[in-house]
Image (tube, rainbow, N blue to C red):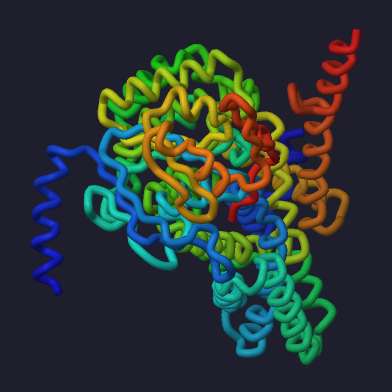
């Protein structure tokens, strides 16, 4: 059994892949709690796809893909804020426009590259076994920044999420905090690029958080439980992909989904079975 | 101009020690780009007044409150608290929202919500101190919900939900308390505890504005009434405000004057106002 666990780790690329997927698992699940509570799933998905042109330009220029992605993500995040703040458009409309435009620009740029199909697949679905030491450093630093900010501004983010009116009476700069949240989300999406790819980031943002939501009654415990599910999904998914020889990002997401479905059925209070039993009892 | 401002501030600063909260509106117009939801409202509410805000649906009651907390842009005019523009004071105003406006599925306990009332006085990055927790605990006790401290807000009854937000408002130690429809859909016990709390706060000279559809309650339990219908119709004691003429202006055809002095308003438990 132990051998079964240790065996893959004799490879350097597996060690780095494991580290990266653990960090991403924790990071996505923690900020994912806000994504779930603030109904930002569409925004997260859009941000993920919108980094494509940044990646493509960085690739064409021979720069670091993550930094290209980061710049694109921040530009799009602020762009969404700009278009929807004018009051003329609803936010989801602004997101839809920018998201599709950025994705198209990315595809146009990438299709000019010879190894088009392979590169696009890596970006869309992740390439966890290709994580370099430099990537790992950048991943670690960005993750610390995001988690540190969420910890320091816990009270502020809690209030603007739960009660915007209280935030207004406290004179909190709601717009600034919102933009900050978007930037943190951009960092997260970029970091996740390597493990699950832009196509599946939204699953890592939403699924562990939603699972934890079914089991907990307070935001701090929701974040902890969510991080736990993120870790389990990343580990189990990665080993599964190693032994079954399937795509790692998809394996991680499917593991997270399996946990979600299980909890959705059996969770106390909010689970399907519990509610069924309770409604049956109240009838009799 | 600068000089004028500084002298004004000086007089006001000295006033604040004597006078807890005076609320002044000068030709205030509130709303988005389209038609204003409230137009040209001017009034002075002395400190420690307890005011019922009444008017038909869409009269701008919630709009007034949201303007007072700085949530809606003021198109014209000024709102002054202690003689200073809105925004000069932090934590001066507490707002008890309509229960429909709260996301009861949010993962938070009663204690979490009440403790949020202290956040305004903490400043950036700071965590609640022991004293903040004590104040929150006192507020819970005052509202009779200590036993619910660790209950998830999603598991509360309507009356309990109301008390949680009252406790939070208490924990804020406000100078001005705004309550949006606190008597709609709550049990009699919660209504009474709410009213006795208002009386208690009046002693502490907290200025209180309560919006309600219950004209009888407004007349019997409040000393001041503010009658709105997209503009200020009347402000004064219930006797001064509830005249056939003012009620007609506010409620129009929805009102019926019965022989013998009775009044019927065809609008008691309406759908919630659609407020921005």
Q: Is residue B7 above or below residue A235?
A: below
Q: Residue at x 38, y 47 (%)?
A: A170
Q: Is residue A181 above or below residue B2?
A: above
Residue toward you, B169 or B3: B3
What is the quadrant of residue A208 in the picture?
top right
Question: Measured from the top left, where is residue B77 in percent x and y?
Answer: 36, 64
Residue B5: tell me if it is visible: yes
Q: Is A117 left, or right, of B65 in this rendering? A: right
Question: Measured from the top left, where is residue B112 in percent x and y?
Answer: 48, 30
Q: Quadrant of the N terminus of chain A?
A: top right
What is the quadrant of residue B187 in the picture?
top right
Q: Residue at x 59, y 27 (%)?
A: B262
Q: Is B74 left, or right, of A200 in this rendering? A: left
Residue at the far top in the pictured view: A284
Q: Residue at x 68, y 83 (%)?
A: A56
Q: Is B18 left, or right, of A68 in this rendering? A: left
Residue A154: tell me if it is visible: no
Residue toward you, A46 or B134: B134
Q: Is residue A222 above or below residue B138?
A: below
Question: Measured from the top left, where is residue B43 in percent x and y?
Answer: 34, 50
Q: Is B117 left, or right, of B2 in this rendering? A: right
Question: Measured from the top left, where is residue A121 in percent x and y?
Answer: 81, 72
Residue toward you, B194 or A114: B194
What is the quadrant of residue B137 in the picture?
top left
């Amino acid at each position: 059994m132990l051998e079964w666990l240790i065996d893959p780790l004799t490879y350097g690329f597996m060690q780095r892949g494991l580290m990266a997927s653990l960090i991403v698992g924790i990071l996505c699940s923690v900020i994912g709690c806000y994504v779930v509570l603030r109904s930002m799933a569409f925004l997260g998905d859009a941000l993920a796809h919108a980094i494509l042109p940044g990646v493509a330009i960085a690739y064409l220029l021979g720069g670091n893909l993550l930094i290209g992605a980061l710049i694109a993500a921040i530009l799009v995040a602020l762009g969404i804020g700009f278009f929807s703040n004018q009051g003329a458009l609803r936010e989801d409309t602004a997101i839809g426009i920018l998201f599709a435009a950025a994705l198209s620009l990315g595809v146009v740029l990438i299709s000019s590259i010879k190894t088009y199909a392979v590169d696009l697949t890596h970006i869309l679905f992740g390439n966890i076994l290709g994580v370099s030491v430099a990537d790992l450093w950048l991943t670690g630093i960005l993750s610390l920044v995001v988690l540190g900010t969420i910890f320091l501004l816990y009270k502020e983010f809690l209030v603007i999420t739960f009660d915007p009116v209280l935030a207004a009476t406290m004179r909190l700069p709601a717009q600034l905090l919102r933009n900050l949240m978007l930037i943190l989300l951009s960092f997260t999406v970029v970091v996740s690029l390597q493990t699950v790819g832009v196509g599946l980031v939204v699953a890592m943002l939403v699924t562990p958080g939603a699972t934890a939501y079914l089991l907990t009654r307070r935001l701090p415990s929701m974040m902890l439980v969510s991080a736990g599910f993120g870790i389990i999904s990343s580990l189990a998914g990665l080993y599964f992909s190693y032994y079954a020889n399937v795509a790692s990002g998809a394996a991680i997401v499917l593991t997270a989904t399996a946990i979600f479905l299980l909890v959705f059925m059996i969770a106390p209070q909010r689970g399907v079975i519990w509610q069924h039993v309770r409604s049956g009892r109240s009838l009799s | 101009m600068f000089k004028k401002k500084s002298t004004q501030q000086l007089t006001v600063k000295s006033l604040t020690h004597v006078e807890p909260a005076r609320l002044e509106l000068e030709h205030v117009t509130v709303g988005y780009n389209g038609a204003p939801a409230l137009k040209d409202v001017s009034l002075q509410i002395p400190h420690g007044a307890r005011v019922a805000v009444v008017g038909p649906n869409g009269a701008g009651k919630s709009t007034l409150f949201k303007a007072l907390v700085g949530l809606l842009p003021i198109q014209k005019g000024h709102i002054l608290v202690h003689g200073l523009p809105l925004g000069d004071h932090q934590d001066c105003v507490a707002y008890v929202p309509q229960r429909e406006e709260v996301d009861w599925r949010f993962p938070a306990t009663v204690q979490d919500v009440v403790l949020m009332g202290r956040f305004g006085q903490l400043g950036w990055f700071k965590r609640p101190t022991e004293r903040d927790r004590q104040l929150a605990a006192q507020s819970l006790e005052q509202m009779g919900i200590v036993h619910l401290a660790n209950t998830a807000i999603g598991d509360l009854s309507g009356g309990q939900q109301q008390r949680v937000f009252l406790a939070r408002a208490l924990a804020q130690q406000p100078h001005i308390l705004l309550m949006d429809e606190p008597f709609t859909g709550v049990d009699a016990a919660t209504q009474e505890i709410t009213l006795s709390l208002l009386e208690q706060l009046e002693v502490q000279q907290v200025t209180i504005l309560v919006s309600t559809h219950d004209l009888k309650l407004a007349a019997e339990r409040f000393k001041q009434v503010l009658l709105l219908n997209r503009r200020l119709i009347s402000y004064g004691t219930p006797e001064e405000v509830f005249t056939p003429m003012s009620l007609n202006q506010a409620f129009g055809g929805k009102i019926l004057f019965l022989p013998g002095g009775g009044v019927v308003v065809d609008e008691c438990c309406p759908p919630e106002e659609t407020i921005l």
